[in-house]
Amino acid sequence: MNPINKKQTTLASRRDFLKTSAAFGALTILPSYVALGKQSGTGIGPNEKVNLAVIGIGNQGGNDLKTLFGSGHCNVVALCDIDLEGKHTQGSLRAHPSARKFKDFRVMFDKMANEIDAVLIATPDHSHFAATMLAMSLGKHVFVEKPLAHTFGQSERLIRMSAKHPNVVTQMGNQGHSGANYFQFKAWREAGIIKDITRITAHMNSRRRWHGWGSKATKYPSEPLPAGVDWDQWMDVVAQPHPYSKKLHPQEWRSWYDYGSGCFGDWGPHILDTCHRFLELGLPTDVTAVHLDGINKSDLIYPASSTIRFSFPERGPDLPACEVTWYDGVKNKPKLEAEFSEPAKGETVAKATVLDRPGKVLYSKDLTFKGGHHGEPLQIVPREKYMDMRGKLPRFPQKNSNHYANFLLACKGEEEARSPFSVSGPLTQVFNLGVLTQRFGGTIKFDTQRKQITNNTAANTLLDPVPRKGWEQYYVL
């Protein structure tokens, strides 16, 4: 295993970057579509469909679009993507030939803001923020893929912006937050079944795209830019643009610190969402890299394997201090203790069980709960304990709108969004802190009141790094 404590400021690229990073305060000249107050009303009649614009129409965005449209609650009026000629965007374009096409979301809003009710934003992590801020400032409902934003400061601004616009419906795309686990966790928590949780193990150990090459990369590769790709627009707010390559677009961006959120930011929203919400975890005071392996020495790409431990303080009478430990990496799998496991076939005594599938285990003073990912419900373990309790367990609703329909129905005033920014924003900030710990190693100490890292200046700067020149206005909307 590689050493945990990495040198924090020895790399020239990081040192130069940190010199230019600072908190924002100065107002800038706003573009016409903001300065002129070109806003449309958010009221949608009960028999009307939501007029939807989509920013990021390939891969996950294409899947999101298909499901939103398939709900029957929306019209697709605009499609926006920096690569309208790419193979990954053609399905969406063919499915909605009458929708107006754009490469730049700023141009889209300038041209047709009054025709849009809601926006799906499914671009890479680094480019969620500006489009979301602009859409909300114009009074548009927003569905934003997870994680909500790439940095802690961006997440903080989105939380504040949603509070300033209470009539704007917001939803993060952690789709399982409208599944069985959501309703079960809520019902069991309210009934006092889930309480006194002191320890949570969460894990996702499948192979990631950067495994095998990530630890060896020494620089960003450069390849000829394909025809039709607006690379400057793809870079969005990133202060240090990099050349085009297939290691960034259309899917590899998640591997890199500057653009993605690694395995934790990708899967954490699908595993820890209900724990964070219904246990009111809030923000941690300490985050520790217990294990890091396959570290990229050039400070570019996520480790191949990591174990990150979060310490959350006591929050109430049955909400004691809680330790959450995250595991990723193909061979870095946690175990379920023997006392909560079932005997293997042909055996009478249970042994500790390796946890293979993505999921979580919650340990309380009296009960232990084992769960999967997305909307998969929890199980009380061992099974013998569950069998003793099953007749007393509260029921929960089984037929509910899915995450996409929930968002569109909320836009129409018929439901409340289940993962609004007031909920998904603080959850994302936990991931924002976790990925910084993966990057720096050691322990990060966090002041939850001031929202500052107190023991690592470089990491604290990256809570809210300076954006690229020309994109500052989205930070002061």
Image: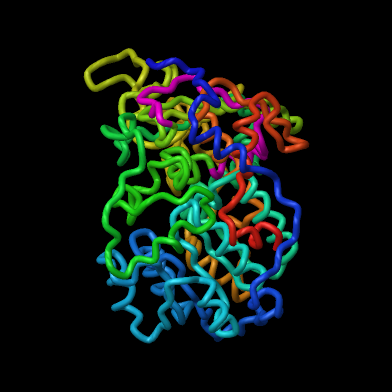
Q: Above or below — where is 311 with respect to 70?
A: above
Q: Is residue 388 visible?
A: no
Q: Whole-percent x and y of residue 128?
A: 52, 57
Q: Which residues are magenta?
A: 273-298
Give the residue drawn at x 52%, y 40%.
Answer: 272
In the image, 446 versus 197, the foreground residue is: 446
The count of marks equals: 0
- Which quadrant is home to the C terminus? bottom right
Which residue is found at the position 53% from the left and 50% from the top? 239
Whether residue 318 is in magenta: the answer is: no
Reply above or below: 231 against 369. Answer: below
Residue 150 image offset from top left, x and y in percent: 53, 48
Q: Position of residue 259 (x, y in %)?
A: 45, 47
**Residue 6 image offset from top left, x and y in percent:** 49, 21
In the rendered image, is residue 476 in sight? yes
The outermost residue toward the left is 346
Q: Nearer the viewer, residue 417 or 318?
A: 417
Residue 30 sits above or below residue 476 on the image: below
Q: Nearer the viewer, residue 52 or 182?
A: 52
Q: Which quadrant of the figure has residue 358? A: top left
Taking the image as shown, residue 107 lies to the left or right of residue 86, namely right
Scheme of colours in the image = rainbow
